[in-house]
Amino acid sequence: MSPGSVGRGPIAFALFLVYVIWGSVYLAIRLVIEEVPPLGSMGARFLLAGALMAAFLACRGGWGRLRLTWREAAGAAFLGVLLLACGNGLTSVGQLHGVPSGVTALLIAMVPLWICLYRTLGGDRPRVLELVGVGVGLIGLAVLVLPHGGGGQSGLPVIGVAVIVLSSLSWSFGSWIKPRVWLPQDVYVTAAYQLLAAGAAMSLASVATGERLDGAIGPRAWGAFGYLVVFGSIVGFTAYAWLLHHAPLSLVATHTYVNPVVAVALGSVVLSEPVTPALVIGGVIVLVSVVLVVSAHARTRVREDSSATEFKVLLSDQKASGGG
């Protein structure tokens, strides 16, 4: 179904879901890892979400709907590890090291910039506006993380920031290489297997690193975990996939700019995370850079069908299967 063939109401509602859900997953992750180790909790999140999605798909289309070729299974597992285990799961590790949820969202928002760099290294010729956007984004990143103020401290842990930037680079690489990987044609089947592969990988990493649960899990952590499974990994992605088929890409792309704003606001209200001048200035610069890169790339998608495919992938900054 082409854009414009459905009413504004359903599109507005789906866009609202993507705005709120993918902007709030960083807060939910922070609430979970306050009580539960990050690798194990996010591994359990992905495994449960993948199992629920697979069961739902089987109920709707029969178990045959979940059949894959070896190439498709390998491709889904490969992208699941890149996008979700490394690209999404590592954000919980970074937040455990003290990076606020709002700053995490801003660092992840730079995914379109890294994709632009991967495209350049792959031989593509980005538009001048895209390169300008990348440069502006690096300035915003410097404002966010470099020491500032009288004490010469940024207040952001170097290890935590490095882990989140690494997760962003992993997600970006997975997004860039995705059109070149064998995958099932059914996007929901692909998502289910990616979730399961990511959950298995993170669970193994949790065991390998010796993570242990200390004490009982409180209701707040359980609630945040349930929110991540149902809304972050299922509802949000479903709404996003639906939007890609029913709304203009330029409209869907606005979630790239709105999600970090939602994350910063929620982190400030719920967890009293400080909104410093450096956060505001650096955040605005980063968002401007993302607007430049996404807008420039959107103009090139009409050149060939593959450009449109890559643009859809580029919009998945937070996450093809559930944000955060």
Image (spheres, rainbow, N blue to C red):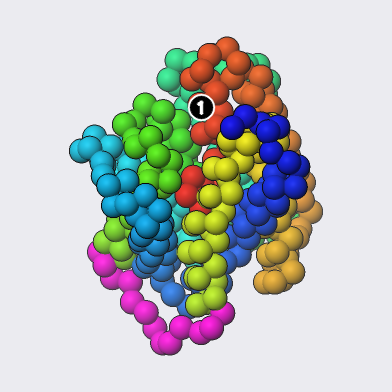
Quick one: 97 or 242, which is closer to the camera? 242
- The residue where tag 1 is placed is 310
Left or right? Give the position of 118 relative to 231.
left
Left or right? Give the position of 281 relative to 64.
right
Residue 214 is a magenta residue: yes
For badge 1, the amino acid type reads Glu
Judged from this view, the residue extending furthest toward the bottom is: 216
Q: Residue 24 placed where, x, y %?
A: 63, 60
Which residue corresponds to the image point at 43% horizontal and 46% vertical from the top-left?
188
- Can residue 195 be seen by looking at this rendering? no
Region in magenta: 207-220
Quick one: 190 or 198, which is closer to the camera? 190
Q: Is residue 59 above or below residue 211?
A: above
> How would you classify the magenta stretch by its main secondary structure?
loop
Label 1: few (<14), some (14–19) or many (≥20) C-alpha neighbours in 10 Å: many
Judged from this view, the residue extending furthest toward the left is: 70
- Can residue 185 be seen by looking at this rendering? yes
Which residue corresponds to the image point at 51% horizontal and 47% vertical from the top-left?
319
Quick one: 106 or 201, which is closer to the camera? 201
Q: Residue 137 placed where, x, y %?
A: 65, 35
Which residue corresponds to the image point at 46% horizontal and 83% vertical from the top-left?
217
Left or right? Give the position of 228 relative to 263.
left
Q: How many marks?
A: 1
Regarding mark 1 in the picture, which secondary structure is present there?
A: helix
Q: Is residue 112 above or below residue 166?
A: above
Q: Using the rendered view, name the quadrant where residue 22 is placed.
A: bottom right
Residue 36 is a magenta residue: no
Which residue corresponds to the image point at 53% horizontal and 50% vertical from the top-left?
237
Q: Residue 292 placed where, x, y %?
A: 70, 28
> Which part of the image, by quadrant, shows the N terminus?
top right
Q: Residue 77 placed where, x, y %?
A: 30, 45
Q: Is residue 176 above or below residue 80?
A: above
